[in-house]
Amino acid sequence: MYKALAHPENNGYVRPYTLQERLAHVKEAQRTLGSGFTWICDAIDNPIKHAMGNSPNSEFVIDGEGRVVRKRSWSDVDALRADLEELVGPVENPTDPADVQLATQPPPKVAARGVVKRIELPSNLRALVVEPKIEPGGQPFYAKLRAEADPELLSTGKGQLYIRFMMDPLYHVHWNNLVEPIRVQFVQAASGEKPLVDSRVKPGEWTGPEVKEPADIDPREFLAMVDMGESREPLKLVVKYFACNDKEGWCRPVTQVYTVRLEGDRDGGRRTGRGRGGRRPGAGGRGDLAGRPGFGGRPDFGRRPDFGRRPGFGA
């Protein structure tokens, strides 16, 4: 079952915005894992994930009548083997994981990586609901936004906001550092033809770093302070950048718009590290999330009271 990414940024992959992009992720999984079985893909609004408890690594055994006969919030190989022996019967020569000889492949490298210094982040950041404005027939979101908030921002409306843009490896694109860098502007939702900078966010405008390498695929990221005051309106963000695909021989200016809601995103996953591949050696894995009692099994996971769920906020 292919669901929402549990750990966005691992191996450079980022959350898809459309069903077509998620299906492209499935093809990438087939390519990188060398799998020959048929994948089941959750819809882009994640109904199967929600129905099955929101765990990133849940395990279900479904019989021929469509009934769930075994379920776990976290996969357990030994328990699953025992279940199958009970339900179906033992096998003479069970397959060992080592027998599969799985040789994973990384995404294609299109430009330099590790040339832009990553920023230090506060702890306990939580992914926010991000809504890209997808225009019919518009350009793909080559660079994708992830927004996170600290506990103070979610609970009081005043705190730190983390903004990160990552190039989506599905499109084999990179930043063009020979032109002006990425520009981000928070604008007032209804500001007419000439957008006004949103005074609730500081800095309300941000320009990315100048990089010596002519091209790279490192994230562009920054921290901002937000003070919502009495406002109930979500944040609106406009980003401008250049995306290049060397294989196809093009560079394009891109302007795209997002709405950021101060609501915790139960489908946003969790970053596991800040290494070059987005993951520290030894980070992640089962202990990263499953060690929290009931993770993925709590009916209200992702629905803790926060700023976005107080009456009148984030509507």
Image: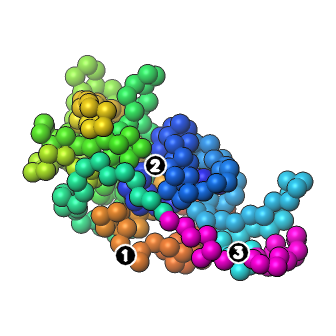
The first of marks 2 and 1 along the sequence is 2
| Residue 144 location (% of width, % of height) | 37, 44
| Residue 281 location (% of width, % of height) | 37, 75
Residue to which mark 3 is pinned: 95
| 242 w.r.t. 57: above or below | above
Residue at x 42% of width, y 44% of height: 170
In the picture, the disc for residue 15 is: 2
* Secondary structure of residue under mark 2: loop
Residue at x 67% of width, y 60% of height: 53
Residue to which mark 1 is pinned: 281
Q: How is the image coloured?
A: rainbow
Quote the CA–CA distance across marks 2 and 3: 33 Å
The first of marks 1 and 3 along the sequence is 3
From which residue to which does the magenta span run?
Answer: 81-103
* Residue 97 placement: quadrant: bottom right
Residue 98 drawn in magenta: yes
Q: Amino acid at mark 2?
A: Arg
Foreground disc of the pair 2, 1: 1
Task: Find the residue positioned furthest to the top.
Answer: 193
| 102 w.r.t. 203: above or below | below
Give neighbour class at mark 3: few <14, some 14-19, many 20+ (Cα, 10 Å): few
Quote the CA–CA distance across marks 1 and 3: 28 Å
